[in-house]
Structures are given as structure tokens and as C-alpha cells.
Image: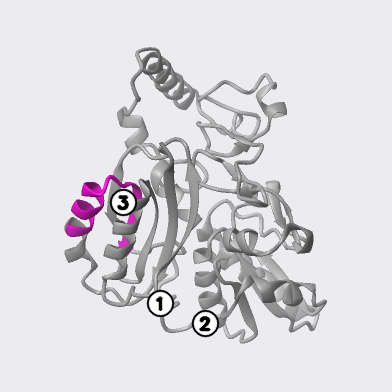
Amino acid sequence: MTYTIAAFYKFFSFPDFESHRARLADTLDAAGVKGTVLIAAEGVNGTIAGPAEGIETALATLRALPGAETLEAKFSQSDEMPFLRLKVRLKKEIVTMGIPGTDPNALVGTYLDPDAWNELISDPDTVLIDTRNDYEYAIGTFEGAIDPRTKTFREFPDWFRDFRSKLESEGRTPKIAMFCTGGIRCEKATSFVKAEGIDDVYHLNGGILKYLETVPEEKSLWRGECFVFDERVSVKHDLTPGSYDMCHACKRPITEEDKQAAAYVPGVSCPHCVDEMTDEQRARFAERQKQIDLARKRGQQHMGPEAEARRSEDTGKTEEEARTENA
């Protein structure tokens, strides 16, 4: 069976979001949809998968929310269901920056579609900033992009304030262009940056995924692969699965060379996280991997308490919540 994967987000005023949770969950579940949907007063954000008709039902239900009529989604296909279950979660923010008052519904940068993006970022008076995490930047980014070296989106505001001070000390007032996987982080980042008093701010509408879908590879300024928070791990320019695997301990992308290293123990550690793990964590991860392997031998899918409760080291979210960063 082929599953349709839909990544989406929409900032809109949603003050009564709590009252919509149960109906959303029931409708999506009845449509055979799995994945994670986050809802908050600032809007919705999610990545879901299911049969094509189920995804159509899910998106129609989301667009029926007052203010979400123009919600758009980015689609891909998978031969396997990439999610274990459906979750519709109530959140303070649909993407966590942690700066009170940051509101893309009230203040946001200039949207640029992929066909206009190349011209902007080729301008020497433009500073191009990758708002994603450091491990995402490491496997692919736009030519000339700055890596803030952040491990979570919460770190971006402090980094930007330091970076702005550096620009000011150099007497520079460049245009600021920002991007992320699907548009949600860079859209919120532009709201924050404009609130800091910078006017000439742009972001890539639809994010990297829309750019890769729209811009022919021969005209592309994208270099490498794009990390995605699902079982594909990364995608190439044609949006087919990339060359990376995932360390299921730290959730970072790993290469075949990484998997040959002594530090790599499936489900327990990799060269990127081996020095970050405590003995207690390694023991817990090893036991989880043992149960996963036993379940596979029995032809079952392991869904133990670790899969539900464990927070990924890189995002601070549960594993399935982290997937919504695609939006």
C-alpha cells in the first residue's frame, strides 16, 4: 500500500483551540490517519500519513477551522506507514521559540516564493540564515547560508541578538533572508526579527521542501540533502529518500561510515552522541532495542513506554512531535 504523507502548518488566531481537539482526533482517526497534529492559540502544525482519501478528509477538516481556510500542505509518498499512532496535542506554541508575544499573525517578514528566492539570496547585500538545527545544516543547506549552530529553535533568539550586534559593529544593514524545512520556523523567526526592529526581512514560502518541489535541479542553489523528521531521514532534490540513516538514540542523521564506527550501537549510540549519554541512558536504550528486536522476530510492532515518553536529545520533543518540524 502507498501512503500519502502531508506536512502542514498555518498561523492564525485560534483562541478556542482546546474545544476542537476531540473532534479533530475523532475525524482523523476514523479516516485512517496517523501522525501528530499540534494545536495552539497561534494556529496548527502537523505531519500526518494515511491513504490518499484519508488525507483529503483530514485536510478538509483542518481547513474548516475558522481562520485556517487557506492552509496548504506539502505531500510525499511512502510504501510504509511512517507513524505508529495519531496524536492531536494542545500546545502553548505550534513551534517552540519561547519568546512571549512573538506573533506571525500580527507581524511577519516578506514571503518569497521559490522562483524569486534565487535572486534574493544571490544578492551580495543579503545575509542568508538557516534557522534549522546544526545537524540539519550539516547534511544540506543553501549555498552561502550561515549556520547559527543551534541545537533547538529556542536558541535562535539569543544567537540572532548576538549576530545583530556583530552586524551593527561592522556598520552593516543587510537584507535578512531566512529558511527552514517547511516554512514554520523561518516564518516565526521573521516575526521575532521584525519585532527586534529590523524591517528588511524575508523568508522562503513553503520552505526547502517547496523549493525542491518547484525549482529544477539545474537551477537550484540547494546543496546536499534535506533532513526530514520521519523514517526517510533525508530527501534528495527530487524528494526521493536520501542516503542517511538515523541514530535512534539521539535522532541525528548518520552515514554508512558512522555505522561502521565502534561508537555505533543500533538504538543505543552513534559517534555523534556516544559521549553525551549516561550509563543509565545506554542501559535504557539497550533494553528498548532488545524489546524492539524481539517484537520484530514475532512479527509485531514495538510500542513500549519509551516510544511514547522519551524526549529526543536534539529537539526536546517526543519522537513523533519532532516530526512536525517538517511543516
Tell me the element at label 3.
Answer: helix
| Residue 238, x across and y down, in percent | 65, 51
10 Å neighbourhood of mark 2: few (<14), some, or many (≥20)?
some
Q: Which is more N-terminal, label 3 or label 1?
A: 3
- Report the mark closest to the observer, 1 or 3: 3
Locate residue 300 relative to residue 115 in the image: left or right.
left
Going by the numbered disc 3, the residue's amino acid type is Gly
Q: Could you say which is closer to the camera, residue 76 or residue 198?
A: 76
Q: Which is more N-terminal, label 2 or label 3?
A: 3
Please say whether residue 53 is one of the residues in the magenta stretch. Answer: no
Judging by the rendered image, the residue that carries numbered circle 1 is 101
Residue 318: tell me if it is visible: no
10 Å neighbourhood of mark 3: few (<14), some, or many (≥20)?
many
- Screen quadrant of the N terminus: top left
Question: Residue at image x 44%, y 49%?
Answer: 5
Tag 3–tag 2 contact (CB < 8 Å): no
Q: In this picture, is 232 found above or below 301? A: below
Q: In this picture, is 140 found above or below 93? A: above
State the separation of the CA atoms marked 2 and 1.
9 Å
Please say whether residue 32 is one of the residues in the magenta stretch. Answer: yes
- Report the mark closest to the observer, 3 or 2: 3
State the separation of the CA atoms marked 1 and 3.
36 Å
Going by the numbered disc 1, the residue's amino acid type is Gly
Q: Could you say which is closer to the camera, residue 9 or residue 129?
A: 9
Question: Residue at image x 45%, y 48%?
Answer: 323
Judging by the rendered image, the residue that carries numbered circle 3 is 54
Locate residue 115 relative to residue 85 in the image: left or right.
right
Question: Residue at image x 72%, y 27%?
Answer: 257
Going by the numbered disc 2, the residue's amino acid type is Ala
Label annotation for residue 195: 2
Q: What stretch is highlighted in magenta?
A: 23-39
Q: Which is more N-terminal, label 1 or label 2?
A: 1
